[in-house]
Amino acid sequence: MTETAWAAKNLPQRLLPKINKARIEKRLKAALEENEDGDDPGRTTDITRRVQRAVQADTLRAVAPLQDKIKKLESDLAEVLETLRILRARPA
Protein backbone atom coordinates (compact mmCIF):
# COMPACT_ATOMS: atom_id res chain seq x y z
CA MET A 1 0.00 0.00 0.00
CA THR A 2 2.73 2.49 0.94
CA GLU A 3 4.64 1.66 -2.24
CA THR A 4 1.82 3.06 -4.37
CA ALA A 5 0.64 5.88 -2.08
CA TRP A 6 2.70 8.45 -4.00
CA ALA A 7 0.90 7.53 -7.22
CA ALA A 8 -2.55 7.78 -5.63
CA LYS A 9 -1.81 11.34 -4.50
CA ASN A 10 -1.17 12.36 -8.11
CA LEU A 11 -4.28 10.73 -9.62
CA PRO A 12 -7.58 12.56 -10.01
CA GLN A 13 -10.03 11.60 -7.26
CA ARG A 14 -12.49 10.18 -9.79
CA LEU A 15 -9.97 7.51 -10.77
CA LEU A 16 -9.37 6.33 -7.22
CA PRO A 17 -11.49 3.49 -5.81
CA LYS A 18 -14.34 4.53 -3.56
CA ILE A 19 -13.90 3.27 -0.02
CA ASN A 20 -17.29 2.42 1.43
CA LYS A 21 -18.84 -0.22 3.65
CA ALA A 22 -19.47 -2.64 0.78
CA ARG A 23 -15.86 -2.41 -0.43
CA ILE A 24 -14.49 -2.93 3.09
CA GLU A 25 -16.75 -5.95 3.61
CA LYS A 26 -15.68 -7.40 0.25
CA ARG A 27 -11.97 -6.96 1.05
CA LEU A 28 -12.41 -8.38 4.55
CA LYS A 29 -14.28 -11.39 3.17
CA ALA A 30 -11.50 -11.98 0.63
CA ALA A 31 -8.86 -11.72 3.36
CA LEU A 32 -10.76 -14.18 5.55
CA GLU A 33 -11.12 -16.61 2.64
CA GLU A 34 -7.37 -16.40 2.04
CA ASN A 35 -6.89 -17.09 5.72
CA GLU A 36 -8.95 -20.29 5.43
CA ASP A 37 -6.39 -21.59 2.94
CA GLY A 38 -3.91 -22.05 5.78
CA ASP A 39 -2.68 -18.52 6.23
CA ASP A 40 -1.62 -17.61 9.74
CA PRO A 41 -4.53 -15.82 11.51
CA GLY A 42 -2.01 -13.91 13.61
CA ARG A 43 -0.58 -12.41 10.45
CA THR A 44 -3.98 -11.11 9.38
CA THR A 45 -4.56 -9.62 12.83
CA ASP A 46 -1.11 -8.03 12.82
CA ILE A 47 -1.64 -6.49 9.39
CA THR A 48 -5.06 -5.20 10.41
CA ARG A 49 -3.65 -3.57 13.54
CA ARG A 50 -0.75 -2.00 11.65
CA VAL A 51 -3.11 -0.55 9.04
CA GLN A 52 -5.40 0.79 11.78
CA ARG A 53 -2.44 2.45 13.52
CA ALA A 54 -1.20 3.94 10.25
CA VAL A 55 -4.64 5.34 9.39
CA GLN A 56 -5.03 6.75 12.89
CA ALA A 57 -1.60 8.41 12.73
CA ASP A 58 -2.38 9.90 9.30
CA THR A 59 -5.72 11.18 10.57
CA LEU A 60 -4.12 12.80 13.61
CA ARG A 61 -1.49 14.46 11.42
CA ALA A 62 -4.19 15.78 9.10
CA VAL A 63 -6.41 17.04 11.91
CA ALA A 64 -3.70 18.68 14.06
CA PRO A 65 -3.31 21.82 11.91
CA LEU A 66 -7.09 22.23 11.83
CA GLN A 67 -7.27 22.00 15.61
CA ASP A 68 -4.63 24.74 15.87
CA LYS A 69 -6.63 26.95 13.52
CA ILE A 70 -9.81 26.34 15.52
CA LYS A 71 -8.04 27.35 18.75
CA LYS A 72 -6.80 30.54 17.07
CA LEU A 73 -10.28 31.35 15.78
CA GLU A 74 -11.77 30.75 19.23
CA SER A 75 -9.18 33.09 20.73
CA ASP A 76 -9.90 35.75 18.11
CA LEU A 77 -13.64 35.38 18.69
CA ALA A 78 -13.18 35.78 22.45
CA GLU A 79 -11.25 39.02 21.84
CA VAL A 80 -13.97 40.37 19.53
CA LEU A 81 -16.68 39.50 22.04
CA GLU A 82 -14.73 41.18 24.84
CA THR A 83 -14.27 44.30 22.72
CA LEU A 84 -18.01 44.35 21.97
CA ARG A 85 -18.81 43.94 25.66
CA ILE A 86 -16.56 46.89 26.51
CA LEU A 87 -18.08 49.05 23.77
CA ARG A 88 -21.60 48.25 24.97
CA ALA A 89 -20.69 49.19 28.52
CA ARG A 90 -19.57 52.70 27.48
CA PRO A 91 -22.11 55.45 27.93
CA ALA A 92 -23.40 56.84 24.64
Image: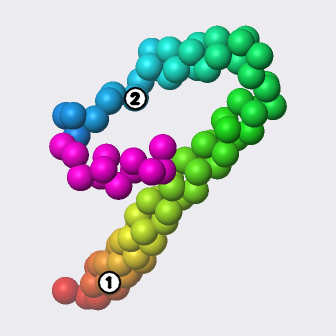
Q: Is residue 8 magenta?
A: yes
The amino acid type of the residue labelled 2 equals: Ile
Q: Residues within 10 Å of mark 2 (few under 14, many from 20)?
A: few
Q: Residues within 10 Å of mark 1 (few under 14, many from 20)?
A: few
Q: Quadrant of residue 74?
A: bottom left
Can residue 74 be seen at all in this image of the molecule? no
- What residue do we see at 74% from left, 22% from top? 39
- Residue nearest the viewer, comparing 18 with 83: 18
Q: Disc 2 designates what residue?
A: 19
The amino acid type of the residue labelled 1 equals: Thr
Tell me where the magenta segment starts and ends, as one range: 1-12
Whole-angstrom CA distance, mark 1 to mark 2, is: 47 Å
Side of 12 where 23 appears, left or right: right
Lower position in the chain sequence, tag 1 or tag 2: 2
Can residue 29 be seen at all in this image of the molecule? yes
- Residue nearest the viewer, comparing 56 with 85: 56
- Residue nearest the viewer, comparing 18 with 75: 18
Q: Disc 1 designates what residue?
A: 83
Q: Is residue 70 above or below residue 30?
A: below
- Residue nearest the viewer, comparing 12 with 31: 31
Question: Which quarter of the image is occupied by the C terminus?
Answer: bottom left
Q: Is residue 78 above or below residue 66?
A: below
Where disc 1 sits, the SS reads helix
